Image (spheres, grey):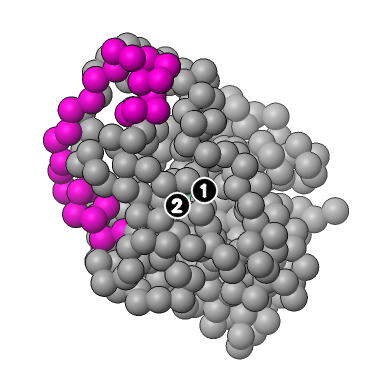
Amino acid sequence: MSKILIIGACGQIGTELVLELRKRNGSAKVIAADVRENCPTVLSGGPYVKMDILDRQAVREYIIDNEVDEVYLLAALLSATAEKNPDFAWRLNMEGLFTILDLAKEKHLKKIFWPSSIAVFGPTTPRHNTPQYTIMEPSTVYGISKQAGERWCEYYFNKFGVDVRSIRYPGLISYTSLPGGGTTDYAVDIFYQAKMNKDYTCFLRDDSALPMMYMADAIRATIELMDAPAEKVRVRSAYNLSGCSFTPAELTDAIRVHRPDFKVSYVPDFRQQIADSWPASIDDSAARNDWGWKEHFGTAEMVDIMLENVDPSKLN
Ligand code: NAD
Ligand code: SER
């Protein structure tokens, strides 16, 4: 059985990915790693190691000495945080990827998952039903890093046979851990305010449609892609993936089905420009045809689950 390392394990995706991989593979085989000193309680049922992906030598030694077979590299700065610190974002988002790609090139790793994003698209991309292959001129440092990362993943696959797999995640919605500084975070924040019976001030305009996905679908997609036979994984940059798509106004209406008095006001900030440069909806037929992707959760189901499960005490 493979030994799996998740780097960036304490984040929004990592937390749920670790839990699901441990359920499937056994806790001892799935090592959570993060730059954070302490392991969050939710991940304490299995191995945890403090690891800085920017410490190339330490990461190499850990992976080689512990005979790790697969890495999920999730450590990154997301779109909004990256715009505040572009130099560091570029360094974090790119250097770690090379460390892991090189380990696979040297045959220390069998398989890698590295996430891309809808941020690879830009203002010149067709906004609706955005195709797998299209114009890609991202205008954020985050999007530029993801586009460059995709190119390097494909290059390492073509030149060195590195088995690297990737998804262009849409905005992800979950309640287990809080989101880490993205443009789509409003679609998580809003549930905490609704649950507390408070009004919400949205940092995007009411009509900003964006592609979104409930986390359980994203985790299942990730594992299905990693489990797919290599010959079925025909896209070695990153796959488009679609769950649902909505505007802040549409999400508010869906929440009002359960909380009719819920009020939202709109005060767009710098994140509006980022949202305006991204697709409204995604064509994911390549993922559907190649490895059988199909979403399970639409907006209404996701809203039910979020209102039931978000825990406002996490905001403290
Ligand atoms: P997050 O910000 O919630 O988590 C990132 C984790 O990485 C954090 O726990 C952080 O402590 C850790 N980290 C930061 N610097 C590190 C370092 N130097 N070494 C080791 N760990 C470090 O992010 P997320 O939402 O879980 O996203 C994970 C990946 O998925 C990122 O690459 C992101 O770009 C991508 N992605 C996320 C979304 C989304 O909506 N969440 C959408 C598209 C793509
Ligand atoms: N949810 C992410 C962000 O907003 C998309 O990559 O940054």
Q: Position of residue 142 (x, y in %)?
A: 33, 60
Confirm or deny contact between disc 2 and disc 1 (CB under 8 A): yes
- Can you tell which quarter of the image residue 148 is in? bottom left
Q: Verify whether residue 275 appears in magenta.
A: yes
Which disc number belongs to residue 170? 2
Which residues make up the magenta segment? 252-278
CB at mark 1 closer than 8 A to ligand 1? no
CB at mark 2 closer than 8 A to ligand 1? yes
- Residue displayed at 73% across by 68% down: 110
In this picture, residue 272 sits left or right of residue 180: left
- Residue displayed at 36% across by 33% down: 251
Q: Verify whether residue 300 appears in magenta.
A: no
In the image, 300 versus 105, the foreground residue is 300
Which disc number belongs to residue 36? none
User: Can residue 102 be seen here?
Assistant: no
Q: Position of residue 253 (x, y in %)?
A: 34, 28
Q: Position of residue 163 (x, y in %)?
A: 67, 72
Mark 1 is on which residue type?
Answer: Gly
- Residue displayed at 62% across by 32% down: 43
- Residue displayed at 80% across by 44% down: 25
User: Which residue is at the far bottom?
Assistant: 159
Foreground mark, 2 or 1, reads: 1
- Helix or strand or loop: what does disc 1 sit on? loop
- Can you tell which quarter of the image residue 108 is in? bottom right
In this picture, residue 22 sits left or right of residue 56: right
In this picture, residue 295 sits left or right of residue 224: left
Mark 2 is on which residue type?
Answer: Pro
239 up-or-down from 42: above or below: below
Quarter of the image for the C terminus: give it. top left
- Helix or strand or loop: what does disc 2 sit on? loop
Q: Position of residue 312 (x, y in %)?
A: 40, 17
